[in-house]
Image: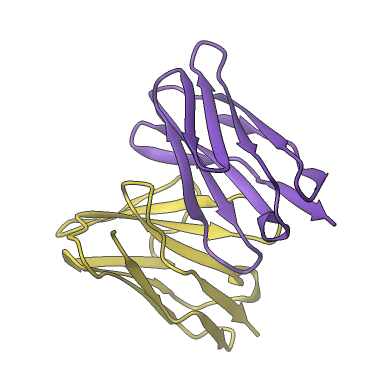
Chain colours: A purple, B yellow
Amino acid sequence: GQNIDQPTEMTATEGAIVQINCTYQTSGFNGLFWYQQHAGEAPTFLSYNVLDGLEEKGRFSSFLSRSKGYSYLLLKELQMKDSASYLCAALSWGKFQFGAGTQVVVTP
Amino acid sequence: GAVVSQHPSRVICKSGTSVKIECRSLDFQATTMFWYRQFPKQSLMLMATSNEGSKATYEQGVEKDKFLINHASLTLSTLTVTSAHPEDSSFYICSASNGYTFGSGTRLTVV
């Protein structure tokens, strides 16, 4: 079956770096997506990896290892507004399988 | 970039009534759209794939007669929750099939 795992919650201080890990077990894998979701709102797209390696987009970077079924999202120079849930999603046979989300709490 | 407009953002309805949620692609043609449901502190669960001009494809366990999907044009997909019950209260979200663009979501509360 399909399985996407990520930690439930992480806490970090303003200005720090946080790494959110995501492991997946899917068939027909064709990419790993990361989203940010604030409470009561729809997700917004952050990053996408289809090949192994690191994708950097400003303060956010995402890494993928297809052989290990592993990805992470790196958030640098944390700001208070980064407090949100971060969802990883595996694209599998043309559909998205979402993890339950990691709630990141940024403290002053 | 691609924009999906979803309405209404919030709706409260009485048990037994039906509610229609609309998703419009504003600047692109969407032959396929996804409909998700999200309960509090849980993941987005794919309910169905909406296909323009043909029947929707429902995920296992989703009642197609209860959650009616219509995708009659390249810019509009609708989800109708029929005979809604309190357990249908949830956050419903549509998205383009590219994975980049989501509607703003509809908070449905059935009382």
Between B106 and A88, the one lying in front of the other is: A88
Across and down, in percent, residue B38 comes to 58, 59
> In the figure, residue B102 lies in which quadrant?
bottom left
Rendered position, B106 above or below A92: below
> In the figure, residue B23 lies in which quadrant?
bottom left
Rendered position, A1 above or below B4: above
Quarter of the picture holding the C terminus of chain A = bottom right
Q: Residue at x 38, y 47 (%)?
A: B99
Between B61 and A28, the one lying in front of the other is: A28
Across and down, in percent, residue B16 comes to 54, 84
Across and down, in percent, residue B106 comes to 50, 73
Horizontal relation, residue B64 to residue B27: left or right:
right
Residue B25 visible within the image: yes
Horizontal relation, residue B98 to residue A76: left or right:
left
Residue B42 visible within the image: no
Q: Residue at x 48, y 16 (%)?
A: A66
Quarter of the picture holding the N terminus of chain A = top right
Q: Residue at x 73, y 59 (%)?
A: A80
Residue at the farthest top position: A67
Q: Residue at x 72, y 37 (%)?
A: A18
Between A55 and A102, the one lying in front of the other is: A55
